[in-house]
Amino acid sequence: MTHYLSADQEYLKETVRKFLSRNLDPYITDYERRGHFPFEIMKDIQPFGMVGGILDEAHGGMDLSFTEWTLLVEEAGYHWASLRAAVNNASGVSLLLRELGTKSQKQEYLEPVMKCERQGWVGITEPDHGSNVAGIETRAVKQGNSYIITGSKVFITFGQWADFGILVAKTFSDTCDGKLSLFIVDKDSSPYIIEPVETMILRSTGTALLSFDNVKVPSSSLLGREGEGLKSILSSLNKGRLNLAAGSVGYAQAALDKSIEYAKTRKQFNKLIGEFQLIQDKIVEMQIRTDASRALTYNAARALDEGKLSRVECSIAKLYATRAGFEVADMAMEVHGGIGYATDMGIERIFRDSKGAMIPEGTSNIQKLIIGRELLGISALL
């Protein structure tokens, strides 16, 4: 890792790993079985910069570079994909509030998020719209000093437990005719229907279907300007892609480390399985994919640190690292054989969660279309 990180950054990474190995790893299997997320861990990891550390100090952050943030997300993924999702969720919510929020919105929502006192969600995906963000059907209609929201959002991370969220909706008012806007929806003052959604992946993130049946929110809940939500969301997706890439590097490294340890201790036919050529072949392929994923991911982080838009870099990193992460997890299952299915081993969890990383923030095919558009100057997106 010395090629990507300074000595101080390596020390931070090692410190985080020791802390999570001691305070989180022994309990993950139980959390997964119960579908529970220990929100107290967020306060514990906040001093490392894992909760909004990418923000400036004036807003409660640490002015971390994207490179530093990436190493923290990689480490979160190394230990638990649900923790990686929590870090991404907190960062996504806090960045939108920092960039678009009014003073009162920041006081009511951003400050408690940064102190780990409140949890939020971001509502983009709908039952009939995933990759096609512009096709969102949820509506917000201006009525007097309020907006009336109708529609639904699905696969919402922490939707079961968070007490507010940032929702994307087509907006209709005297000054906006159907363009996308962002709204803060507070569960207490503007109640909505919450239905748990059980998934193969991220079993401890309270995934939910949220339904809004003429939910009234005050005009002050508008986040940013009317009709400018699409630009804000697409910008946030770019950082989300870097997060998924970094997390996938963590998944791959964890699967690789477990496989190396197993190959050096497991015996079959009176030999360590690490002595078999086919096992060594898999270990080597796993290492190559992990190293390549890390290189592409830190390249994207550096591009963001240099002030570049980095659409291509982030999409390439997300495309390759998430795909490679799953391939490494698949090979880890083969190295472990039947024991890899056991939940206590952690391999089956990495296998499930690494597959899940290929879909959010734009599927692999969408990433190819984004990269192709940037390279050719021709859009194949419908």
Image: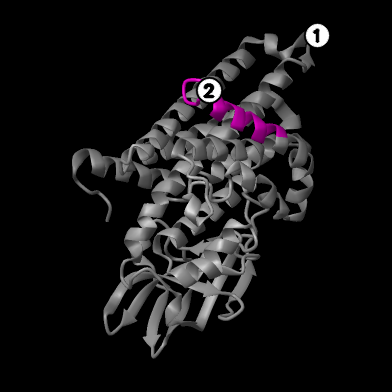
> Residue 1 got which mark?
2
> Residue, x 46% and y 79% (percent of image)?
150
Q: Is residue 330 visible?
A: no
Specify the amino acid type for callout 2: Met
Where residue 241 appears, as percent x and y from the top left, is 44, 45
Image location (x, y in percent) of residue 151: 47, 76
Which one is earlier in the sequence, the residue at label 2 or at label 1? 2
Expressed as whole percent of the image width and height from the top left, the position of residue 240 reads 46, 48
The answer to which quarter of the image holds residue 120 is bottom right
Disc 2 packing (10 Å; few <14; some 14–19; many ≥20): few
Where is 183 relative to 233, above or below?
Answer: below
Quadrant where the C terminus lies?
bottom left
Q: Nearer the viewer, mark 2 or mark 1?
A: 2
Front residue of 256 and 22: 22
Q: Is residue 357 left or right of residue 372?
A: right
Q: CA distance from mark 2 to mark 1?
A: 36 Å
Task: Assess whether residue 7 is covered by the magenta stretch.
Answer: yes
Q: Residue at the location (78% across, 44% down)?
A: 27
Where on the picture, by quarter, is residue 307?
top left
Q: Tell me the magenta residue range.
A: 1-18
Q: Which mark is residue 280?
A: none
Q: Image point 33% across, 70% down: which residue?
A: 225
Q: Nearer the viewer, residue 366 or 87?
A: 87
The answer to whether 271 is drawn above or below residue 136 in the figure is above
Q: Secondary structure at mark 1?
A: loop
On the image, the x and y values in percent for residue 139 come to 40, 77
Rendered image: mark on residue 270: 1
Q: Secondary structure at mark 2?
A: loop
